[in-house]
Amino acid sequence: MPCANRQYPSTVHIVAFGAGALCSQALYIRELLCLFSGTEFTIGFILSSWLFWVGMGGLAAARFSSRVVKYSKSVLGSFALIVSILLPFTVIGIRAGRSVLAFPPGTIPEYGRALIFAFFVIAPTAIIFGALFNMAVRSRDSDENGLKSTISRVYCLEAVGAVVGGLLFNTLLLRWFSHFEAALIISAVIIATTAYPFRGKISFVAIALSVSAAGLIIFGGSKIDQDSRRHIYRGYDYIASTSSRYSESDMVSSGEIISIYSGGGRLFSVPDPVGAGEAVHIPMLSVDDPERILLAGGTIGGTIDEISLHRGVRDIHCVELDRSLLELYGKYGPASSSRDNAGPEAPSVEWIIDDARRYLSSTSDMYDLIIINTPLPINLMWNRYYTKEFFREVSDRLRSGGFLALSHRSSENYISPELSRALSCIYRTLEEEFDSVSVFPGSTAHFIAGSRKVRANDIMDKLRERELDSGFFTGDALPERLGVERVSHLMKAMEGGNNVRINSDRMPALVDYELELESRRVGNRVLSLLAGYGNVPRIAILILTVLPFIGLLGVRGNRNTGSGIIMTGFAALVFQIVLIMDLQAVAGVIYHGIVMISASFMAGAALGSGGFLAERYAVLHKRRNLHIIILMMVLSFVLFLVISERTGIGYRAHEAGTYLFSFLNGLLAGSYFLASVKASSIASLDRNPALYYSLDLLGGCVGGIIGSLVLIPAVGTWWTLALVILLHGVGSVLAVGRVSD
């Protein structure tokens, strides 16, 4: 039992629970993203699943805690111990699921089964965190300030804990520890905090678990972590892994082939002279005098050697985002290439550790050829290198007569309708920013964009002139591949996609076409559904989304407090999904940025639900006014996006702006929660202290699913923002004259 002179749970305990909840959520998202090969549209589903189970935990605990009020503090302490044990085991469970659902490694899983797995694997942890909120309210002495103040205070403290947890997770845990080791550290903190006020069995168990967790971190955490990773790559020889804020990467081998996987997908394999030659030779042969080359992505695995075969190359700039990936390859990869023995005429190679898009927007260097050698754009991270906004940035960094080169998996003989749409999308988007776009067929289709056309004969002439010493690229095979009939066949197939959309940051059409292509290749029905929204009118999707809330708010009448919370929770999560997806589409930092976005949202929620602003500004007491203020905030974000597109503000500024609007979103959502609690009856709160908390989470659950799996893929950023504006407009109208206001 807790000691008689100690309050339980204290402020420190609730803050620790909030920190543990956010860190757990972030860990699960990062692990599950690897299951879905980094497809960001699933982030909303994972968030929604978390919110759903937290809401269910709060509702279930209401019945449970009302019957055992006498023992609620001991039960709460026991629950805290259980959740600390679940956290590292869930990380292991997710990896075990990956080994089954996404095998062989690097393949996209069957989405239906994978989504069901993601929904249930995080349930135990989320349910207990939801129950802890309700039990924390029940266990605290609320006689002095009343039950309403207690609910708001616990909500606020939990949000403060989430902010603290987010900052520590992003600045400390991600930089120095693997996911499993981070889970052990978080568990140890929760256990140690839980043990503080107890004596007897609970204290003994907590101390024993704390010592065990510390021992695992020091002596066995790394081994367990690597064993769980090794199981994902069964059938391969596991070599090593590395963890960074950008991703977790694994190096495995099969025979003489060494492969590196990152974020659930295969980045490259070595030795692969065919792939390395395919990536660079047609682009290099398109340029008359290729002196300065920028290689973005795929810099490991022989591409530099192949570029060096071309006479006249002086400088090669290699851009890679993650330094830990280079260190992993340098430590465990194969012996150095033949370039180490090159003579004085070998080109100078400079490594740039940065995001290629961020680098190109900030550098003043000019290039004869920029080669984009990234994985296929099946997610927003890689789609960033195929949008018209990026192509515009590239065009500013090309010398006179320079080219941008990128490639896409294709077919020499048969172009399916799905492949045709993907290739046509790339071609049409390039035409938006470049005077001329040339396309060359093969099992890999090459796009060469610049100020003039490149002919197949020009490429073959340069191949003979430069006398390339490449076992893959020969003058015998190239004429047949680049023959007139094959080129015209590919161009005709792409011309069939007249209704194909232009790919942009805020309307990522190419991701839809890629998912459609992948779903047809593997027979994935759920994936096909996600990619099939392009056939549905956008206005129909918006109307079908808004109508249920109009009915809910209108029918409930004066009892619309709960309905308003559901709608506001829905709109807040949809807006949060917009912030997440927009940041990823532009800056590509969501793998660690998701933590800061969540922390900034919870910081705002703490300030709003704590009533610090409501005490000064009476306008925040009325929910109708809050609907109008939220509407104005969303309009301000629209203006921010327009200005960022027109003026080209830096990526750091865009990232900071995203965190600011996330904070404001949390602030207003928390203020709305507080206003709803103040407007409700004490009888309803006494029956279920977590009622509105659960309704808020359940509304957010629906918003996360609809926002990420329907709205963003189907209608894009602008129309989704229009929906949020419409919802709050409806809310402000229907809130007029309500008794609760």
Image: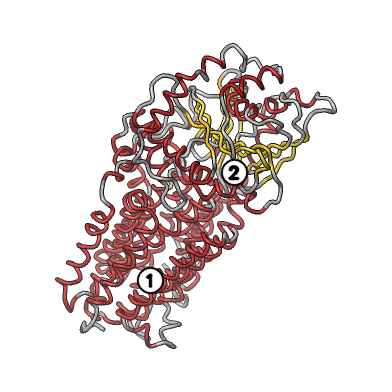
Q: Label 2: how many residues lie within 10 Å, few (<14), some (14-19) or many (20+)?
A: many
Q: Amino acid at mark 1?
A: Ala
Q: Secondary structure at mark 2?
A: strand
Tell me which label, 2 or 1, sits earlier in the chain: 2
Q: Amino acid at mark 2?
A: Ser
2 vs 1, front mark = 1
- Residue 388 coordinates in the image, percent (x, y): 50, 47
Q: Is residue 725 above or below residue 406?
A: below
For the residue pair 435 and 710, the one nearer the viewer reads as 435
Q: Label 1: how many residues lie within 10 Å, few (<14), some (14-19) or many (20+)?
A: many
Which quarter of the image is occupied by the C terminus? bottom left
Q: Secondary structure at mark 1?
A: helix
Residue beneath the point at 45% across and 40% down: 428
For the residue pair 141 and 619, the one nearer the viewer reads as 619
Answer with left or right where residue 343 lies relative to residue 587: right
Residue beneath the point at 66% across and 54% down: 362
Residue beneath the point at 29% across and 59% down: 56
The residue carrying mark 1 is: 669
The residue carrying mark 2 is: 243
- Residue 627 coordinates in the image, percent (x, y): 33, 75
- Residue 263 coordinates in the image, percent (x, y): 51, 40
Is residue 518 at least partly visible in the picture?
A: no
